[in-house]
Amino acid sequence: MTRKGVATRQRIVEGAAAEIRERGAVATTLDDVRARTGTSKGQLFHYFPDGKDELLLAVAKHESERVLSDQQPQLGDLTSWPAWQAWRDRVVARYLAQGTECPLNSLMSQLGRGTPGARAVTTELIDQWQREIANGIRHMQGIGEVDGALDADRSAAALLAGIQGGVGVMIATGRIENLEAALDVGIANLRR
Amino acid sequence: MTRKGVATRQRIVEGAAAEIRERGAVATTLDDVRARTGTSKGQLFHYFPDGKDELLLAVAKHESERVLSDQQPQLGDLTSWPAWQAWRDRVVARYLAQGTECPLNSLMSQLGRGTPGARAVTTELIDQWQREIANGIRHMQGIGEVDGALDADRSAAALLAGIQGGVGVMIATGRIENLEAALDVGIANLRR
DNA sequence: GCTAGAATGGACTCGTGAGTCCAAAAACCG
DNA sequence: CGGTTTTTGGACTCACGAGTCCATTCTAGC
């Protein structure tokens, strides 16, 4: 693949991602992507021979990377209580800005969650996210700010579930309170 | 509408719900529903004049009622720690049984979450669920088992977010650990 | 039992969107 | 350069699924 080729491919993925963020995966057609990215049917199938599913999966990968990178550098630096608070604020702000469209969820229900590729993307995302939180907890245990008897992985799992659910509630109802409550209560409980 | 009419309508909704539970909302067509319920196009549009969207919304209502009724009577009777544990087990069992298909989520991304009707259904479900949990917490405060200074609504919001997220993770990855962690950690923190 | 309104069956239209195909243009490499 | 491969444009096919329509059958009340 030539330099021009990779550029086009990337343009397609990013355009598709933007389209899906704005209008949802259900409503987005290949023609929409074509129009937005200034490409042709030929190109779409040249770069994604397996068609729409392959493109959607590529977009899903792209979006899942954004989820974590949008939380950096705070997520990777949970080394003091103010830092935890900064991360908490970052997460809330990120999802407030995103509004009620969740591209990844949208993508996943389109692809079918059972699909090996789709599952791999989400599993990878969840694992990495939980690992970073657990590292933060372990660091706080190291400096004596969190009870050393706590199971860091289990606590991280619970906290991550709270975030996920808070985001879910916000997407479904438009209310941010559950996300805030989950983060605040979760962090407060670590802190005791 | 005659007696026969309501029976048919209900048969359609339940058949559609079953189809969607098995194969997802994206993959389910009116023809599938027709075949499964032994009805004709004429009937489908007779009972749901606005077509597929109206049917899907009816199915969504139906499913959202199941979510809460599947947790009864435990959810309505959170009056002792063993009762909380029984509820927790019920929730875990329910979602283990459901597997990786989430009909409601599937339905919602199909309908578009912004839709007034769709949003009303989810909001109602979340509200009622959270209210029941909060009542349980208040009861435990009443008998001195939970710190009276705790904000019951906020704690319920956080716990519900944990459940939602745990379910979400399980649907996405197939793993039940986050749901268990969210429930166990959440309840343990009430208990202190 | 007769009639108005409800319920049913199923053939038909119609738009849309995924995917195919091939020829023209551009890029790469010796 | 010249040949080869990649990239691009866009017309075309094809299937499928939502929704329409009307003729027929059934139901309920008088």
Image (spheres, coloured by chain):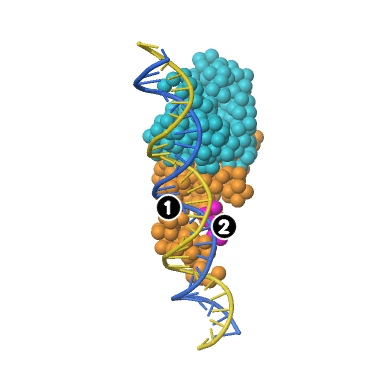
Chain colours: A orange, B cyan, C blue, D yellow
Which quadrant, please, contains the C terminus of chain B? top right
Q: Secondary structure at mark 2?
A: loop
Q: Which residue was labeled with disc 1?
A: A19
Q: Position of residue A51 (x, y in %)?
A: 53, 57
**Mark 2 — on which chain does it sit?**
A
Count up the numbered dots: 2
Distance (Cα) linking label 1 and label 2? 20 Å
Q: Position of residue A139 (x, y in %)?
A: 59, 44
Using the image, determine if residue A34 lies above or below residue B182: below
A49 drawn magenta: yes
Q: Nearer the viewer, residue A121 or A188?
A: A121
Residue at figure coordinates x 44%, y 50% from the top left: A28
**Mark 1 — on which chain does it sit?**
A
Q: Nearer the viewer, residue A87 or B19?
A: B19
Three-letter residue code for mark 2: Asp
Three-letter residue code for mark 1: Glu
Q: Judge from the rendering whether residue B93 lies leftward or rightward of residue B115; answer left or right.
A: right
